[in-house]
Image (spheres, rainbow, N blue to C red):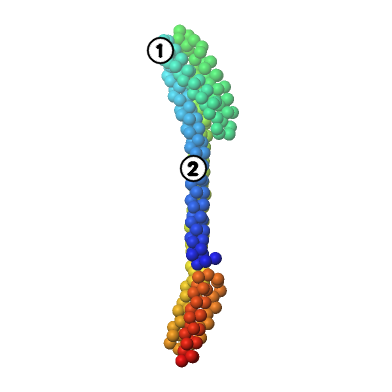
Amino acid sequence: MGLRGKIVSGFLILVIMLAVAGLWSIYELKSTGFSVQALLDDNYRSIHASTGMIEALERGDSAILLLMLGKWEQGRTLLTRSDSLFSAQLSFAYSNITVPGEKTLLDSIRLKYDLYWKFWQRPIVDTPREGNLEWYCQDVHEAFLDVKTAVQELQRINTAAMYRTASDLKQRSNRAVMPGLVAIIAAVLFIVILNYFVNHYMVKPIVTITDRVKRFVQERMPYKVTIETKDEIAELSESIGQLCQTVKSRDEAK
C-alpha cells in the first residue's frame, strides 16, 4: 500500500469508529426517550385518574353531609355529579393498566366503592339518619376512608412506577453515553498506535535517509539504508541510493 493510502486508511478508520459510536449513541437515546415517555405518560394518566377519583369521593362526602342537614336537592345533585366523575375516572383507570397488580387494586376500589355507594343511596333526609353524626362516623365515613385509602394506594404505586422509570432513564442514559466514551478511548488508543506506526515507518526512515545522505555528502560514506515497507519512501531511498552510486562512480573516474 502506498504512503497516501496508509495515511487515508488510518484517518478513515478513525472516522468510521467515531461515526459508528455517534450513531449508536443517537439510537440508544432516541429509543430510550420513546419508551420512557410512553411509560411516564401511562403512569401520569393513572395518577390523574386516581386524583379525579379522590376529588369525586370528597365531593360525595360533602353531599352526604348536605343530606344529613336536610338539604335534599343540593345533596342529591352533588352526589350524582360525584358518582359520574368517580365512575368515569375508574373506567379510564381500567383502560390504562400498566403496573403489575393494578387491576387487582382497581377491583378492590370498585368493590369498596359499591359498599360506600349503598350508604348514600338509602334515604337520609327525613329519616333517623338525618343529623345522625354517630351513624355517619361509624358507617359512612369509615366506608369513605376505605375507598379513599385504596385510591391513594393506586396513586402511590403509579408514583413509585414513575420514580422507577426516571431511575431507569438515568441508567439508560449512562448506557447511551458508553458508546461515545468507548469511541473516545478507542480513538485515543488508535491515535497512539497510529503515531507509533507513522514514526516507525515514515518519520524514522526519512530521518535515517537524511542522515545517510549527509554522511555521504560530507564523508562519502556508502549509502546503505534498508526500508521495511514497499512504498514511496522505499522508492525514494532506492533512488537516492542509485544517485549516490552514480556520484561515487563519477568521483572514482576522475
Amino acid identity at mark 1: Gln
Q: Is residue 20 above or below residue 39?
A: below
CA distance separating discs 1 and 2: 53 Å
Quadrant in the rendering for residue 219? bottom left
Q: Residue at x 51, y 55 (%)?
A: 16
Q: At numbered mark 2, what does the secondary structure look like: helix, strand or loop?
A: helix
Q: Residue at x 58, y 34 (%)?
A: 100
Which quadrant: the N terminus? bottom right
Q: Which mark is residue 30?
A: 2
Q: Are marks 1 and 2 in contact (CB under 8 Å)?
A: no
Q: Which mark is residue 217?
A: none
How many labels, in total? 2
Camera-side residue: 237 or 89?
237
- The x and y percentages for residue 169 are 49, 43
Camera-side residue: 7 or 39?
7
Q: Is residue 93 above or below residue 205?
A: above
Mark 1 vs mark 2: give the one in front: 2
Q: Is residue 27 something that shows in the picture?
A: yes
Q: Earlier in the sequence, mark 1 or mark 2?
A: 2
Residue pointed to by mark 1: 74
Q: Is residue 167 something that shows in the picture?
A: no
Camera-side residue: 223 or 251?
251
Query: What is the crowding at mark 2: few (fewer than 14 residues within 10 Å), some, or many (at least 20)?
Result: few
Q: Residue at x 46, y 15 (%)?
A: 80
Camera-side residue: 245 or 130?
245
Q: At numbered mark 1, what does the secondary structure look like: helix, strand or loop?
A: helix
- In the displayed orientation, state which residue is furthest to the front: 253
Relative horizontal placement of residue 35, taking residue 70 as reference (left or right):
right
